Amino acid sequence: MIESLLVANRGEIACRVFRTCRERGIATVTVHSDADAEALHVREADAAVRLPGAAPADTYLRGDLIVKAALAAGADAVHPGYGFLSENAEFARAVLDAGLVWVGPPPGAIEAMASKTRAKELMAAAGVPLLAPVDPAGAVGADLPLLLKAAAGGGGRGMRIVRELALLEEELKAASAEAASAFGDGEVFAEPYMERGRHVEVQILADAHGTVWALGTRDCSLQRRHQKVIEESPAPGLPDELRAVLREAAVAAARAVDYRGAGTVEFLLSPEGRPYFLEMNTRLQVEHPVTEEVFGLDLVALQLAVAEGAALPAEPPAAHGHAVEARLYAEDPAAGWAPQTGRLHALEVPGQASAQVPAQVPGRMAGQASGQASGLVPVAASAPRLRVDTGYTHGDTIGVHYDAMLAKVIVWAPTRAEALRALRHTLRRARVHGPGTNRELLVRTLGHPDVIDGRCDTGFYERHLDALTAPVPGERHAAVAAALADAAARTTGDTLPARLGGWRNMAAPAQRKTYGEHEVRYRATRDGFVVEGDDGDEVRAVAVSPHRVSLEIGGVVRHFDVRTYGDEVHVDSATGAYRLIARPRFSETGHRTPPGSLLAPMPGTVVRLAAGLAEGARVTAGQPLIWLEAMKMEHRVTAPASGTLTALHAAPGRQVEVGALLAVVTDTDAQDVQDAQEESSE
């Protein structure tokens, strides 16, 4: 019996495993980097062990330190979560060699499937259809587009699409460097990239007694940078014959390596519906909650039961209804999905008692020590139910070292249409204050006709990103609400009503407040606030308080909730959420960056420079010059124009903050004009 469990991971998945441990009476141990010293998973664990440093290579990828931590804390088992060392056979062996229980598949199974190249060989021998690999050294134009993939790990890291042969060498280096940083293994391979393919996978669960469950299908086609954004179960629109083929192939893959525990077999479906084996993930998946919701299971509890030697029932429970999961990321989709950092002021999802720990879902089945399922209650046709899995809560800081996911928001409903609508409504009403997020993208995605009709493929965001990231309508009205709420707070305080008193007969002067590009003019009168200027023709202040403003806009009254954190203002309404930055009343004078400056688009670490890059070098517009690593992903900083590199402040290994000056490119034409002027003045 497992009495104390160390989770060799961080964030959301560590908190998720801890919840099941609490329900089963298992003590919890966590590890943490210096950057995570105050993280939620550290606060929730019964015991915590420090891993000195911040970079994954120094902390969460140090299997030797994690095994020592487990022994020092008295844990008798280790759960790897996902990512980091979860698919590292040597780590699994080290855990077992230390006399600890490994909550995962046998090291041999991990080894067989951890290398995607080896896994494909095994599947080919089993008759599973595959995409033929391509040797990058011999690739020709007819092989394009190519998909580069890390042989180890997952999560979209170490993956690149190559559409031009001239870029192949550069992208190979980038993919290899990213894979090495994320997984400690820089091996990369290439295969044909299928346009408009669907990403469909099968959840498996196997015990040591010969039973293998195939728990339905999941559709994970909605991806950005090859990392999943929205997942659902079951995969929509698949004929029964194809579902059977996928289940049989997944079970065959598990039996081929004597698999035990939870895992996932991933397939790519061609536009014609033909399946191709992609890989087998020998771990729990990020998207496992949608399977749990549909089958009424706790997969973590079943992982623990299998690790204790329990036998699964011969058949899994029946599936009911539909579940959809959206990953809420701290990122800016309109800026190349650039990760965002800073303090998370609020994370509140309506209908969820606490956004810190996922609520117990009625009807869940947890595996017992005997392996027999208990507490299985058929999911009734009822109202949608909500679940939030997260590793953050208000007041936490989102840093640069790890994944940008804030939370997973999951909705189960009797039908797919109800689940999509309920999740969209929930995300729209959520209060997420702090760094920018992809929340609006998620809301728009869930309402897109292709998504509603189940016509999604892996290229969805490439085709629709501009429309999905267009400015949210109504920001001007949000700025008006913010300005009036600020005025009410300064006039009446946070607890008094917004009605003003003590008026003299003379009219009060008009006040101005600017948020971004929106200047709001208003006047305080005996009867309240009056909006002036162009806004005054269609906007009337109905009720104003420091945190809530009601405006009549074009004859319709709308309500705005306002929260201020220094110069950052968040305005939430039924029509959208807005993050505004208050501008100072007077323009500040001071240092201005020179034209042609390359500024860091995010906090991160400079990992490499373009070959031969030095002051005086000639560069061309759009040429990649500097690579930054943030949240385990590489981001390129390109030349803003053709010209001469006149300053270079970036160096490999240097950590930079957002907006830091990395280099300066002086435009060629501008430089020639300046030189001519200097010569004529002589």
Image: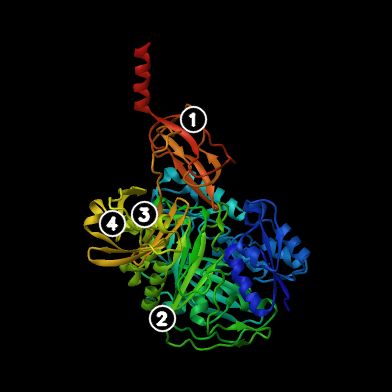
The nearer-to-camera label among 3 and 4 is 4
**Nearer the observer, 531 or 92:** 531
* 274 relative to 381, above or below: above
Tag 3 near tag 4, CB within 8 Å? no
**Nearer the observer, 413 or 367:** 413
Tag 3 near tag 1, CB within 8 Å? no
| Residue at 63% in and 81% down | 210
Picture coordinates of residue 359 (x, y %)?
54, 76
Specify the quadrant of the image occupied by residue 357: bottom right
The residue beneath circle 4 is 530
The residue beneath circle 2 is 240
Indicate which disc residue 483 carries: 3
Q: Secondary structure at mark 4?
A: strand
The residue beneath circle 1 is 647
Picture coordinates of residue 24 (x, y %)?
66, 79
Q: CA distance from mark 4 to mark 2?
A: 63 Å
Quarter of the image for the C terminus: give it.
Answer: top left
Tag 4 near tag 1, CB within 8 Å? no
Q: Amino acid at mark 2?
A: Asp
